[in-house]
Amino acid sequence: MKKIDVFKKEVIFTLFLFLCVHFVALAQNVSVSGQVLDSYGASLPGVNIVVVGTTTGTITDIDGNYVIEVPADAVLRFNFVGFQMQDIPIQGRSIINVTMEEDLMRLDEVVVVGYGTQRREAITGSVASVRGDELREVASANVTQALQGRVSGVEMSQVSSKPGAEMQIRVRGTRSLNASNDPLIVLDGIPFAGKIGDISPSDIRSLDILKDASATAIYGSRGANGVILITTNKGRKGQEARVSYNGYTGVKTLFSEYPMMNAAEFSELREAAGLFSNSLEELSTNDTNWQDLMYKNSMVASHDLSVSGGTENANYNFGIGYYLDESLLPGQNYDRYSMRAAIDQKVGEYLNFGFTSNSSFATTNGANLGLYSTLSASPLASPYDEDGNLKRIIRMPQDDQWVYTRETIENLGDGWVNQTRAFGTYNSFYGEVEVPWIDGLKYRVNLGLNYRQENFGQYTGEGVFNVTADNPSTAAIENAHTINWVVENLITYDRSFGKHNLNLVALYSAEETQYNKSRLSARDIPSDHFQFYNLGQANGELTVNPGDQEYYVSGLSSYMGRAMYAYDNKYMLSVALRSDGSSRLAPGHEWHTYPAISAGWNIKSEPFMDNVVWLSQLKLRVGYGQTSNQSIDPYSTLGRLSIRPYNFGSDFASGFYVSELPNAQLGWEFTETMNYGIDFSVLNHRLNGTFEYYEQNTKDLLFRVSLPSTSGVGSYMANIGESQNKGFELTLNGTIIDNRNGFSWDAGFNLYANRNELTQLASGQDRDESNWWFVGHPIDVIFDYEKVGLWQEGDPHLDVLEGGGGNVGMIKVKYTGEYDSAGVPVRAIGPDDRQILSLEPKFQGGFNTRLAYNNWDLTMVGVFKKDGILISTLHSSSGYLNMLSGRRNNVKVDYWTPENTGASYPKPGGSTSADNPKYGTTLGYFDATYLKVRTISLGYNFNNNAFLNNVGVERMRVYATVQNPFVMFSPFNDETGLDPESNSYGDENAAVTTQYRERLLTVGTNSPATRNFIFGLNLTF
């Protein structure tokens, strides 16, 4: 019994000693040190480090280093804005280095809005944000190309496939008829006076798009069509100087040739048409691919070098960049040099000032080079003579044509130049004073000074591009200058009182823009060496066309007040009032005042939602606002005089006549918008989304009213008409796999649809056929016949409907007239049978996905569109490349023959209208559906590489990208192999440029689309 008691005592004593040792160990502190880096290997200063469950903590120094005394079994929490919080147990270690991963949700916590920033959860208007590194996933000349498919409700449409071309931007549809539909660009807080192509994508840190009136009204009339806020890169205070290089170079290859007939196909077409036979220069043994003689793989390159850093009271960023984009066509290219600087300095405790400067110099060459002559050249003709030398012209049955090949154009030397040189410098300065005796009260002044000039020169030597060898040379110069200044005075008050957050802004601003353009042309320049540099040496006439000279000064003054209030992060309210005065409008109508109000409710913050654990966020938003538009030509209120030359006896004189009437009542066009939104996040923020519905009603449209010829005046500008846009937007972003064994998968998707309608025109009219505007239909429509098939043998009513001038195999169009009692049409097809065809897709959107495994990453970005109409001038009679007569080469189509009656295109040599098949314009309309992968990129990050760290490289990434790899689900691409994206305006790149209205986008004979293969490098020292 005693032995058992002794045993128990020994066990108890042993346990007691063990616990004492354990508690002594717990009480003993250890020193832990290390370095904190971001995912690219760059040090992170200011990271907050605390011992979990205590108030003990420290922060990292300027190099990301830290030292802390902690219990041996402690857990360290690393926390830094924009990065995922990490809890790391000590586990007896004395050195712990940490790599922090970016938290996409938290990076978006602070969003740039008009005249300030706001937490994402407090946003009540419609604001979309894209980070700069996301934009750079698509290598591009400007941010518009990189944005395509990224933002719901923002449509980026290609208007040209030439190097350096910008895209058309439409935020929630088209509102105006004659006023501008382009959004306002704001660069670093100052309205941008240049072209968006002047801004290098490498300079952009973030981009925020304000879409509804409750968000844009703060910018007044300038924000009528949406606002794009661009924030450029800056250094961080306390950051050591860091040098970064971002560059890529690549090869541009042909996406697809324009589908023209080869020699055998063209010979068959001629035989079927029976209208033309081979000329003396056309031989059945020839098979010339004229496109092969023009195209050549080219290159694209971008190089950006920057240095950034900061001290305790300042930060800076300086950079230079170069971009080159070459076309597959000879002599056609674009390059841009850019330079930027940004400095912020704090002086004392209450004063901050700084400036940003963005300057660029861009050169565009060969913009007037097209492909019509190349595509229309007969494949039966050879460009070479019997001796193997290039001919000057080829002869076809009814046409002589200058020989367009890469070799002939490159051999022109000084005989041809088409060049635009553009220089722009955009500078903003600010000073900000914090009022010491009132916390949160600040005064700030912004000053923007902007200048842009374009110098255009063109020279075409004697006989160049002309069948006549001695056709006189021509030259022209054009110079345009834009000077813009803006001054903004802001008073802001931003305070928190317990659960109450209040932000007040008051503003007065003034701006002025001065623009002038002049153009001079000449004929018969004595030598190619002069080109366009000395038109005074011309032997022929000098021409100064009054219609080519422009000058205006335009001003805008504004007052604005806004209040944003939030209670307990649950209830948010924003109210704004803006008043603008424009010099472009009539006296007594210059000023317009309009309100905006929006509210938000964070439902997830309510106590009754605490048990809904799967839901991370749920917020409702509603907003109403009014914006206005004054973006018409200055002096429209005054009317217009034009000049007409005439003979007065034996003298030559010029007289003035009224071409546009004045309007002393011309006022503002304005839009009222309602916006409803739901923001949600589920599964611990693994899936985030936004759904919005909006309705915009635009009234008092600024509209150039056409007058009858009997009035003696062409038109006048007035406030007449109304339009409406309504639609929905859905955005989803999610993390499918979150760093599982080194593997991550993120994906994003957006879908939107806009329904546009013209609801009212002038004087109660329901149609304006000359402009293709019709009440009850979208602003952008086609007014034309509707093809319903081809006439077949035995079809009834052919003679009646075609007035006896038709034939089997010709295009059959829709008849809208009446029928007699026997079911026979009462009249022939005529203008009354033209239909109003909407171009609008049912919906469109984009997607992106990123897969990562350890240091590897794979990114894909794409866009899609469902339905709508694509206009191809290649197939339409306006392009004169589908005449189906054999006069010139023809686009490859499946045409009707007695043996091929199921074809889609008419019989060659059938009924015609102006050398084209009758109703030939209907052949150019295709289903606009497509899904296009815009870019696929594979990259590798050299993180924590010992060798690179030893040579001072903090971050290194290499990547390979393919752009425009493939297109799916496109009927147009299936038939032609071509890119289904538009590449021209309606009055460009077609033989007949009056068939389609200028505002419509088409696929024309522009520079060919390319598929690019790019290799890039990102370095940080």
Image: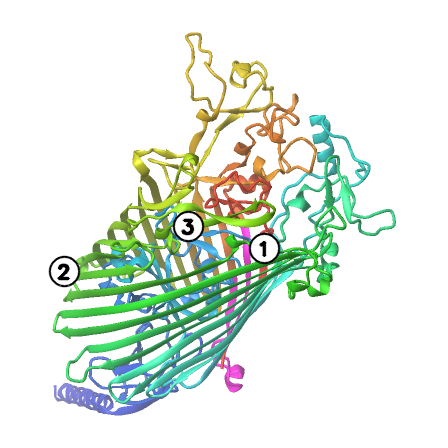
Q: From which residue to which does the magenta span run?
A: 937-966
Q: Which residue is mark 2?
A: 606
Q: Which mark is residue 229?
A: none
Q: Position of residue 149 (x, y in %)?
A: 42, 54
The residue lying at 25 percent from left, 69 percent from top is 508
Q: Which residue is mark 3?
A: 640
Q: Position of residue 496 (x, y in %)?
A: 15, 73
Category of crowding for the residue at label 3, using alpha-carbon neighbours closer than 10 angstroms: few (below 14), some (14–19), many (at least 20): some
Residue extending farthest to the front is 649
Find the distance from the CA under tag 3 to the CA under tag 1. Answer: 47 Å
Q: Which of pointers 2 and 3 lies earlier in the amino acid sequence? A: 2
Q: Which of pointers 1 and 2 lies earlier in the amino acid sequence? A: 2
Residue 92: image quadrant is bottom left
**Left or right side of 463 for 54:** left
Find the distance from the CA under tag 2 to the CA under tag 3. Answer: 62 Å
Find the distance from the CA under tag 1 to the CA under tag 2. Answer: 52 Å
